[in-house]
Amino acid sequence: MYCANCGSVISSELNYCKSCGMRLVGDEKSETSNRILATLIITFGVITIVGLGILLALIALLLDRGATEKTMGMTVVFYLACFTAIEFVLGSQISKLINSTIGKEKKNSTKISQPAQISPRNTAQLPEPTQMPISVTEHTTQIFEKVPLREN
């Protein structure tokens, strides 16, 4: 058996390649998350279709019973608010699952990138100083000047 990344000979019992360190066995967690994602997407679609069907049946029932426009409007608005909240929660869970799946795929990517290297600057590339540097000897020699002593 050969590694798909570097082509070195590997044993079938290994989980990782000895040469490049690439993971050789499939990730069971990603298969589970893919099944959960598919189930959530199907659930989202079913709830959307069934929810809109229930809304139409509710409107037909209210019209059949002779409900007033105000009662029908309030009922429809309340139903749509609840329906939208349910759809939002399901949609956010689907979004989180998709983002985690994409993050795992990026982490398990077979691309091996080279570390970033910054070339050192030589003296020709350094900017010219705007001020002359202060001399250390000028400031240290002033300390050694004789100070007249006061006589008491």
Image (cartoon, rainbow, N blue to C red):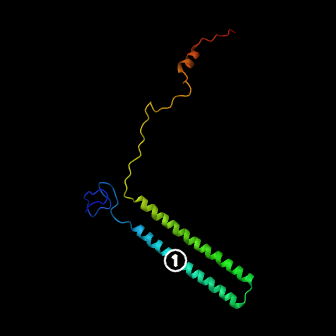
Image-based side of 36 in relation to 60, left or right: left
| Residue furthest bottom in the image | 64
At 64% from the left edge and 76% from the top edge, which residue is drawn? 82
- Residue 148 shown left or right of residue 20 in the figure: right
Identified at 38% across, 51% down, the residue is: 113
Furthest residue toward top:
151
State which quarter of the image contains the N terminus: bottom left
Residue 12 screen position, x and y as percent: 27, 64
Please give left or right for residue 11 compared with residue 44 in the image.
Answer: left
Q: Quadrant of residue 19?
A: bottom left
- Above or below 10: residue 147: above
Q: Quadrant of residue 146?
A: top right
Where's residue 123, x and y in %? 44, 30
Q: Tell me the residue at 68%/77% (across/down).
A: 77
Tally the marks: 1
Looking at the rendering, which quadrant does residue 122 occupy? Answer: top left
Q: Which residue is mark 1?
A: 43
Q: Is residue 11 above or below residue 84?
A: above
